[in-house]
Image (tube, rainbow, N blue to C red):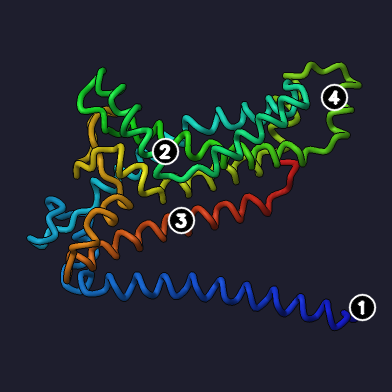
């Protein structure tokens, strides 16, 4: 079937937009690689994982403490936010009255729109002092986990809500006809059927958590060390870039570009995993 002129214009416009988006991503990667090349040439890639410490003015470039900080704060936030987000989506679909569910969804959308600096300010002024009552100084891995879990909860919750909405209604009717309880229907039918969408939501939330900068910079304490407990201060890769890029020069500056490359590689892996899951069959 031949396309009309208007349809052809639309198709080529969409192809052009996709090409531009892909080119922008490629240029960003090239930019990061060019910026990081001097230090990788002089020190080698292994220096970023094997050096004694992060002291770039002394040619020591160990990024491992910041990498651990990013990974631990992300894992903690995702582990806390995911069950809450999925339960909130289930609440809206199966337990809440329609009017309450609408209000609840608007509140979740409102949480998603709050700037990260506001979360960070609240964490610094309210949450960190509360944690400090248990273990000083309060700005810590735990504070970062709690702030990030609040920030990524709306992302996971909205995608979980969409995944559950895509479960065929005929499945529900069949379960009701067989006399299944509401919880049995959720556990045996809804969650397995929506699994790929739920996993995609978790991966998208993980991507936002690991790329967050301002909030974790304000509440995590920014100590360059591998934490021994959740009350220890940590620094993430994103916070390290934000803190030091303004005054970094030469190989110090180039090493911060390496941090950006590592983050880009992690995000790229998460996006590819989400794409694979989203192509999976809805029926699990």
Percent from the top left, x then y, of residue 153? 53, 36
Q: Residue at x 65, y 38 (%)?
A: 160
- Disc on res. 1: 1
The answer to which of marks 4 and 2 sits earlier in the sequence is 2
- Disc on res. 267: 3
The answer to which of marks 3 and 2 sits earlier in the sequence is 2
Left or right: 36, with 171 as reference point: left
- Disc on res. 175: 4
Q: Nearer the viewer, mark 1 or mark 2?
A: 2
Quadrant showing the N terminus: bottom right
Kindly indicate whether the residue at mark 4 contacts the one at mark 1 (C-beta within 8 angstroms): no
The answer to which of marks 4 and 3 sits earlier in the sequence is 4
- Disc on res. 119: 2
The answer to which of marks 1 and 2 sits earlier in the sequence is 1
Q: Is residue 22 above or below residue 67?
A: below
Work out how far the residue at label 4 is from the one at label 3, CA to CA, in angstroms.
39 Å
Q: Nearer the viewer, mark 4 or mark 3?
A: 3
Q: Is residue 166 above or below residue 9?
A: above
Q: Crowdedness of circle 3 by 10 Å Cα count: few (<14), some, many (20+)?
A: some
Q: Residue at x 60, y 35 (%)?
A: 108
Quadrant showing the C terminus: top right
Q: Is residue 175 above or below residue 272?
A: above
Kindly indicate whether the residue at mark 1 contacts the one at mark 3 (C-beta within 8 angstroms): no
């Amino acid at each position: 079937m031949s396309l009309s002129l208007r349809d052809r214009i639309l198709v080529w416009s969409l192809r052009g937009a996709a090409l531009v988006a892909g080119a922008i991503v490629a240029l960003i990667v090239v930019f990061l690689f060019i910026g990081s090349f001097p230090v990788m040439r002089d020190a080698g890639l292994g220096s970023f994982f094997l050096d004694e410490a992060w002291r770039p003015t002394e040619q020591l470039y160990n990024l491992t403490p910041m990498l651990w900080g990013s990974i631990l704060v992300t894992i903690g936030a995702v582990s806390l936010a995911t069950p809450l987000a999925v339960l909130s989506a289930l609440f809206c679909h199966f337990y809440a009255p329609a009017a309450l569910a609408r209000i609840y969804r608007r509140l979740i959308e409102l949480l998603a729109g709050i700037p990260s600096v506001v979360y960070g300010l609240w964490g610094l002024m309210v949450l960190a002092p509360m944690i400090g009552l248990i273990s000083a100084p309060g700005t810590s891995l735990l504070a970062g986990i709690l702030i990030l879990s609040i920030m990524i909860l709306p992302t996971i919750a909205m995608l979980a809500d969409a995944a559950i909405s895509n479960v065929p209604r005929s499945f529900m009717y069949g379960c009701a006809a067989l006399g299944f309880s509401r919880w049995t229907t959720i556990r045996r039918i809804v969650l397995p059927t929506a699994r790929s969408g739920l996993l995609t939501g978790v991966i998208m939330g993980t991507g936002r958590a690991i790329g967050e900068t301002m909030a974790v910079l304000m509440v995590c304490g920014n100590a360059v060390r591998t934490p021994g407990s959740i009350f220890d201060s940590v620094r993430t890769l994103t916070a390290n870039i934000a803190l030091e890029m303004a005054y970094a020069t030469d190989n110090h500056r180039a090493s911060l570009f390496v941090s950006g490359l590592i983050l880009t590689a992690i995000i790229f892996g998460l996006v590819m995993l989400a794409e694979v899951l989203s192509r999976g069959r809805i029926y699990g």
